[in-house]
Amino acid sequence: MHPLYGSAWDPSRVDPAAFDVWSWFNLVGAGGCICWVIAYLAIVRQSHRDRANGLPMVAVALNFSWELLASFVFPNPVALWHAFDRAWLVVDVVIVAQTLRYGAAYQRLPQLRQHFVAVFVLVFVLGLVGQYTFVADYPDRLGLVAAFMINVIMSVLFVIMALERGPGGPGLSRAGAWFKMLGTAGTSIECHFVVRMVDPELRGLGFLTFTCVTIFVFDCVYIALVSRRAPA
């Protein structure tokens, strides 16, 4: 019984097949997780070269709060998944540092530029509390649905960032865009099996499917935007 859920956590109701790392859908998901690591590294590299944040500030704050919870709070019965959580967290520390260092200069609102760090901390705290309470109160035991909700926000903000900065804009990583799309596609397939097995109370996977399709559409738009040639 995990302390996050108290008496509501009944491991006997979970299908153990969800945690078989050699099942085909978990292998696809592992490939997706590797693609996410590559996406993060590509974004870090581009951000360092351009001295510009490579992820939107709100997305970074929400993503970092999820990775902290996934690494230290949410239950995770699979060592490989836990290793991916920690790997993402380590790289995300660098992304947070780059965001705080470079992000203020790319904010259009002067008030946001002036209070950039304070706003980042506020979004981070709200994300931390909101995600914890969501996972504790709703059948999302591994925090996977919450992760896809954040991913939707990230994908939409990526498109907005690309439109604001234009073709060849600073911090825009083509490799990061492609590997994010591939990574999310792999984990989307995996989670459509794992979530059904881990959270049997769910009436369906319609919302999860909605988030996955929405992410894919916006990721494709983002790839198209970052692939445009910069003006001569």
Image (spheres, rainbow, N blue to C red):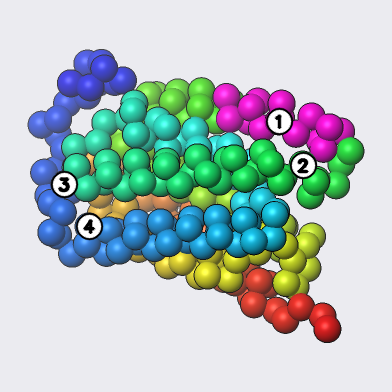
Q: Earlier in the sequence, mark 2 or mark 1?
A: 2
Q: Earlier in the sequence, mark 3 or mark 2?
A: 3
Magenta part of the chain: 111-125
**Which residue occupies the foreground of this view, 175 or 23?**
175
Q: Amino acid at mark 2?
A: Ala
Query: Disc 1 versus disc 4: distance between alpha carbons?
Result: 38 Å
Location of residue 133 in the rendering, given as x and y in whole percent from the top left corner: 45, 23
Dots 2, 1 in contact, CB < 8 A: yes
Reading the image, the residue beneath label 2 is: 104
Helix, strand or loop for disc 2: helix
Helix, strand or loop for disc 1: helix
Reading the image, the residue beneath label 3 is: 19
Q: Amino acid at mark 3?
A: Phe
212 to 85, vertically: above or below: below
Q: Earlier in the sequence, mark 1 or mark 3?
A: 3
Reading the image, the residue beneath label 1 is: 117
Reading the image, the residue beneath label 4 is: 26
Query: Disc 4 versus disc 3: distance between alpha carbons?
Result: 8 Å
Please report the residue visible at 85 percent of the width from the left and 47 percent of the height from the top.
Answer: 108
